[in-house]
Image (spheres, coloured by chain):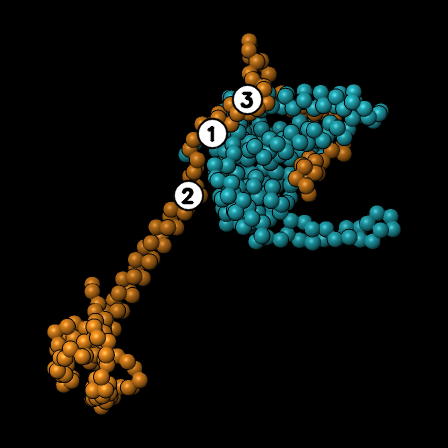
Chain colours: A orange, B cyan
């Protein structure tokens, strides 16, 4: 749907010279009054004032508004068309909102990073390189690795141990 | 949807290696690990958690060593113990990572983005101010209680790697539950 702004309609009339005929403000073309020369004669100013006066009389509009008003039927048509546009935009907006919400919901539910093990294996390799600790060759131990960590520092523990305080102490809290 | 992922805050690992009695925490961690094994879930360990645990190991061993004197021999002795325990921790963790029971993760975001997000969350929260009694004749004092930037970074990593739950013993995480950035994560604070 295309809505033509009233001013553009008048521009189109200008190009064909129709507005002057409609408003009765035809003027002779002369070299002195072209846009190229940028000269505005007293006659031209007078002509402008006449146009405003004529429109004010005929259409009862405020002469301070620097535009040419279209007819009431045109305005009604414009309003109808604009209302339709607003309604279309509202519907599009609602559809986009719904689509965005669905995507956001999916984003929260689905794992974002699928290459978890690739990242983890790479980090392990780097950890082994930095620490100098590599897997022990030979027969793998039967002990569950969780059990190997359980109580690793038990000889440094007592009843006063508070894991939160210990962690806070290294977090600078 | 793949295996479920859970994030252990450093306090759980510290509790587990020290077999903490306070509030039966070590026992709670054990039950959690047993459940995770049963469900075939994966525990996420971030670089931040790893570094915090290693730092606690250093501090705890140093500070509980019975005092005799302090010379180079004593320092070397403490360092040796720390190195031995550090190696054991890394070995155990490496096995878990190799067997894909634990995933060793680090943020894939740029450092710039990472700090901007942390800063944004940090500055939009304040926490609370409380008082505590001074010892002896000292007057009461104010204490700031609130989320720290490390807490935010743990939660951001958990979120980035789609952790279903973030387990911690630290109540400081409670404030993060209300942030839109952490929608989808359940903060389990015990």
Point 75% across, 21% down: residue = B76
Residue A115 lies in quadrant? top left
Q: Are marks 1 and 3 in contact (CB under 8 Å)?
A: no
Q: Kindly give the residue lying farthest to the bottom in the view shown.
A: A57
Disc 2 packing (10 Å; few <14; some 14–19; many ≥20): few
| Residue occupying the point 18% across, 79% down | A32
Q: Mark 1 points at which residue?
A: A119
Whole-percent x and y of residue B56? Answer: 68, 32
Q: Write down the residue under mark 2.
A: A107
Residue B91 x %, y %: 59, 20
Mark 2, secondary structure of its residue? helix
Q: Which residue is drawn at 47% across and 29% down?
A: A119
Mark 1 or mark 2, whichever is nearer to me: 1
Which quadrant does the N terminus of chain A fall into? bottom left
Left or right of residue A61, residue A15 in this image: left
Q: In this view, does B56 lie above or below A135?
A: below
Between discs 1 and 3, the one toward the N terminus: 1
Indicate whether B138 appears above or below B105: below
Label 1 to label 2, Cα distance in Å?
20 Å
Give me the disc on residue A129. Answer: 3
Q: Check the image and name the residue furthest to the top.
A: A138
Towards the viewer: B3 or A165: A165
Q: Where residue A51 sits: x, y (%)?
A: 21, 86
**Mark 3: secondary structure:** helix
Task: Give the spatial CA distance, label 3 vs label 2.
Answer: 35 Å
């Amino acid at each position: 749907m295309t809505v033509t702004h009233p001013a553009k309609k008048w521009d189109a009339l200008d190009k064909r010279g129709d507005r002057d005929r409609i408003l009765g403000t035809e003027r002779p073309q002369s070299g002195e009054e072209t846009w190229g020369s940028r000269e505005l004669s007293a006659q031209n100013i007078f002509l402008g004032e006449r146009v405003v006066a004529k429109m004010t009389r005929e259409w009862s509009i405020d002469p301070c508004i620097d535009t040419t008003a279209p007819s009431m039927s045109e305005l009604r048509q414009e309003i109808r068309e604009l209302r339709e546009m607003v309604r279309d935009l509202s519907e599009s907006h609602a559809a986009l909102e719904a689509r965005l919400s669905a995507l956001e919901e999916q984003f929260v539910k689905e794992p974002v990073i699928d290459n978890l093990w690739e990242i983890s294996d790479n980090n392990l390799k780097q950890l082994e390189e930095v620490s100098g600790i590599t897997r022990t060759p030979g027969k793998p131990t039967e002990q569950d690795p969780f059990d190997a960590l359980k109580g690793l520092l038990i000889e440094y523990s007592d009843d006063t141990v508070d894991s939160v305080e210990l962690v806070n102490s290294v977090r600078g809290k | 949807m793949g295996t479920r992922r859970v994030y252990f805050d450093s306090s759980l690992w510290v509790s587990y290696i020290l077999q903490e009695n306070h509030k039966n925490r070590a026992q709670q961690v054990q039950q959690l690990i047993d459940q995770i094994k049963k469900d075939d879930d994966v525990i996420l360990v971030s670089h931040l958690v790893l570094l915090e645990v290693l730092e606690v190991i250093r501090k705890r061993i140093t500070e509980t060593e019975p005092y005799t004197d302090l010379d180079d021999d004593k320092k070397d002795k403490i360092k040796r113990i720390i190195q031995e325990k550090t190696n054991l921790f890394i070995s155990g963790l490496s096995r878990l990572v190799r067997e894909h029971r634990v995933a060793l993760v680090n943020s894939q975001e740029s450092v710039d983005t990472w700090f901007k997000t942390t800063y944004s969350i940090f500055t939009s929260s304040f926490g609370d101010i409380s008082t505590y009694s001074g010892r002896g004749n000292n007057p009461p004092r104010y204490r700031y209680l609130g989320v720290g930037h490390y807490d935010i970074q743990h939660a951001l990593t958990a979120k980035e790697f789609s952790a279903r739950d973030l387990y911690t013993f630290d109540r400081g995480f409670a404030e993060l539950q209300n942030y839109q950035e952490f929608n989808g994560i359940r903060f389990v604070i015990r």
